Image (cartoon, grey):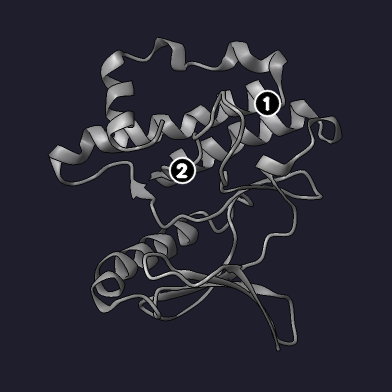
Amino acid sequence: MSIIDLRPARKDAPTVRLISISAEPFVQKSYRDCPPLLRETVGRLAIRRECWALRKLEETGHAPRLLASPDPFTIETEFIKGTPLEKLDSSQVNPDKLFEQGRSLLMALREAGIAHGDLGHDHWQTMGRECNLIWTADERLVAIDFAGSIPLKFPLNPFKNVCLALHLHDRLLLSKLGHHFCPNHLDQCEEVNWPVSLWDLLRILGKV
C-alpha cells in the first residue's frame, strides 16, 4: 500500500490522501482526526454534501466518481489525473476547447441543481490559490472538492440569495478562463452587468 499526503493533517481541516493498494489510486478525504466538535458538525455536513453532489454529477464527466463513504466523516473518490488549472500553461491548451468545457461544466452543475461555490475565485487576478479544477489529458475540465456545494433551490427562503450568489460566483469561471487562457471569449463573460449588491454579498461570503 502507498499513501501520499495531498493535504497534511490539520486540526481545522480534513486530511486528504492519495492511496494506492492494488488497483487504481483513489483520493481519501477524512475529518476523523479533527476535534470532535468540528468532526461532528462541519465534517459530517461537508462529507454528506460532497457525496450528494458527486452522485448527481456521476454521468457528466465533470466530477470524480464517488467510490465509497466508509463512515460519516470520510469520502473516497476517483483520482483525477491531469493538471490543476492554476498550473496549466496557456500555450499547451486549446483555448476554444477549454472554454467549451467550462461552459459544459457550468451547464452540468445547473442541470444537477448544484452551486459549487469555489470555482470563481481569482477570475481576473493572478491565480494564487487552488482552483478546484483539473484539466485532463483527454481535454476534460473536472471540478473537485464539493464540500462547500449547496442546492440551487434551498427550501429555506433566507438562503435563496446565498444560493443565487454562489451560482453566479461559479459563472465567474468563464471570466477566469477568458482572462487567463481564452481572451477571444471575454465578450461572453457577463459579470460586468451584476448589481453592486451581489458583489457585496460575495465579499461578505469571502468569495471575491
What residue is shown at x 38% (from left), y 70% (from top)?
A: 11
| Quadrant location, the C terminus | top left
Q: Is residue 105 left or right of residue 44?
A: right
**Residue 36 % position (x, y):** 26, 78
The amino acid on which the numbered mark 1 sits, given as a three-letter code, is His
- Which of the 4 image quadrants contains residue 26? bottom right
Above or below 116: residue 14: below
Residue found at the far right of this picture: 92
Q: Which mark is residue 134?
A: none
Which residue in the structure is indicated by mark 2?
A: 118
Above or below 42: residue 132: above
The amino acid on which the numbered mark 2 sits, given as a three-letter code, is Asp
State the residue in front, 208 or 26: 208
What residue is shown at x 52% (from left), y 42% (from top)?
A: 108
What residue is shown at x 63% (from left), y 67% (from top)?
A: 78
**Residue 38 % position (x, y):** 28, 69
How far apart are labels 1 and 2 at the CA level?
17 Å
Which residue in the structure is indicated by mark 1?
A: 180
- Which of the 4 image quadrants contains residue 127? top right
- Which of the 4 image quadrants contains residue 81? bottom right
Tell me the SS state at disc 1: helix
**Residue 103 % position (x, y):** 59, 31
| Quadrant location, the N terminus | bottom right
Q: Is residue 83 left or right of residue 45?
A: right
State the residue in front, 104 or 29: 29
